[in-house]
Amino acid sequence: MTQSDSYLARIGTLIRDARQHSGLTQAQLAAELKTSQSAINRIEKGQQNLTLDTLARIGSALDSELVSVATTTGPSHLRVKGGTTLSGSIDVKSSKNAGVALLCAALLNTGTTVLRKVARIEEVNRLLEVLESIGVRTTWLNDHNDLELVVPETLDLAKMDAEAARRTRSIIMFLGPLMHRMDEFDLPYAGGCDLGTRTVEPHMTALRPFGLKVVASEGSYHASAARGVAPERPIVLTERGDTVTENALLAAARHEGVTVIRNASPNYMVQDLCFFLERLGVQIEGIGTTTLRVTGKREMRGDVDYAPSEDPIEAMSLITAAIVTSSEITVRRVPIEFMEIELALLEEMGFRYDRSEEYLAENGQTRLVDITTHPSQLRAPIDKIHPMPFPGLNIDNLPFFAVIAAQAEGQTMLHDWVYENRAIYLTELNKLGASVKLLDPHRVLIEGPTHWSGAELVCPPALRPAVVILIAMLAAKGTSVLRSVYVINRGYEDLALRLNALGAEIETFRDI
């Protein structure tokens, strides 16, 4: 194979992985690019020469910097000098998923909404672009990331920034608020018709009782809302999803009657949304349980000030970095209610740490602690590790146990039953010296302990596995390179800089 052929094969593999992560078939990507499925097939097999313009269009369609090389700046990469020990203290930032939900919830209120310490990540930036395009005034107030939103009486959805909307999966949470403001509207989404129908159906279980009808066409949802329709009995969600529960809450918030939601997610971002809605005058019973009783308000015109709580997934990321590098650090402002299962499992594996007394987050509700980690000799757990809906082990925290298990003595099985392909990306740890065996698309077997060694990898298109690889690089001897880290920037704010403040040596660079 020539060097050119090898390059094309590598690019083709990256495009295939990014497409699969986006949930698109080859035919759907072909339709987006106005080409044939056979052309996409050739590209993914490395059998098609590619111009920079073609790569840029593929990158835009897949929302992936993996192939966006035709921009003026190009993708950013990380160079990691591994084998260093971390020390010091670090605060956990506010919840990404709560912040995204609250941006959507702000559409309910025609007063002024101020959200405190909002994560300035790419997912938030895309939502703000959408909100601004339809008439919402958004202002960053200070260096603390306090954000002010002023929603007009009338929104201009015809001017919606469709490109920004297609780059955020959170756009589906506009359905709940917008159904109260207009009889018909369209929302762009990424992907083809089949994907759209499948994605929206669980949400329709929640929203149909309020009179909302949604039809997924090529690239957009067409929604129509019937006035005067109200749930006649409790809404039973067919899946205990976070965004599905949030959409049901957003719809119920401006329904003047009582709405009962069963099989609701009680996860951290749902609780933050409930606390925010209470500030707007909505009455909610059962917060933190799977049954919510919501008494809504027809109009919301007040000024509201709210601080979302800290992010348990970021807390897990930082604790994992300490474990893998055998470091003693203090992770402050850990939302303990959403970390107790993870910490109990880590204790079973031999993890030693100190925990402060509990104190309240700025929302006055969420319980926080400070965790001080200690270098620990880890052993594999007796049983497999698998996620469950809250209060079980968080689905987004599961990948971190892959790199932790690689440090432990013995064999550990991880069962990622929720996602079809995420476990596959964990095998990338093998390139850094780990022993991760893929049993099927949902299960991996990890043998430890690992003697990490540096390598150059391309960032997988899945957020948590990408951060897991970065953490492994912190422990790997020598210098590692993680290429095209846009996916990390979507979910973490200044992660490299903040790890450097603890003693890591991570350099951000771009190709010339």
Image: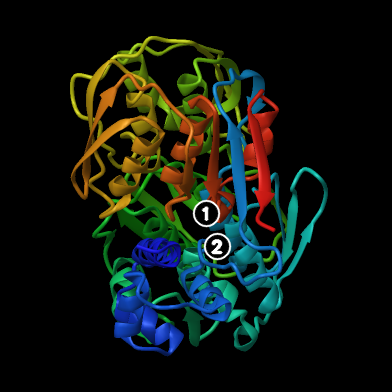
- The alpha-carbon separation of the residues under discs 2 and 1 comes to 8 Å
Amino acid type at mark 1:
Val
Q: Which residue lies furthest to the front in this view?
A: 2
Please state which of residues 73 and 102 is positioned toward the viewer in this rendering: 73
User: Residue 298, image x and y in percent?
Assistant: 55, 69
Amino acid type at mark 2:
Glu
Q: Are marks 2 and 1 in contact (CB under 8 Å)?
A: yes
Find residue 155 and report its image quarter.
bottom right
- Residue 398 is at least partly visible in this image: no
Find residue 104 and report its image quarter.
bottom right
Q: Which residue is drawn at 49% across and 64% down?
A: 170
Q: Residue at x 66, y 24 (%)?
A: 502
Q: Is mark 1 on a helix, strand or loop?
A: helix
User: Residue 510, image x and y in percent?
Assistant: 67, 54
Q: From the viewer's perspective, is residue 192 above or below residue 393? A: below
* Label disc, if present, on residue 106 of the rendered structure: none
Q: Name the residue under label 2.
A: 65
**Figure quadrant of the C terminus:** bottom right
Q: Mark 1 points at which residue?
A: 487
Within 10 Å of the Cα at label 2, are there few (<14), some (14-19), or many (20+) other Cα atoms?
many
Q: From the viewer's perspective, is residue 180 above or below residue 259? A: below
Q: Which residue is drawn at 60% across and 19% down?
A: 86
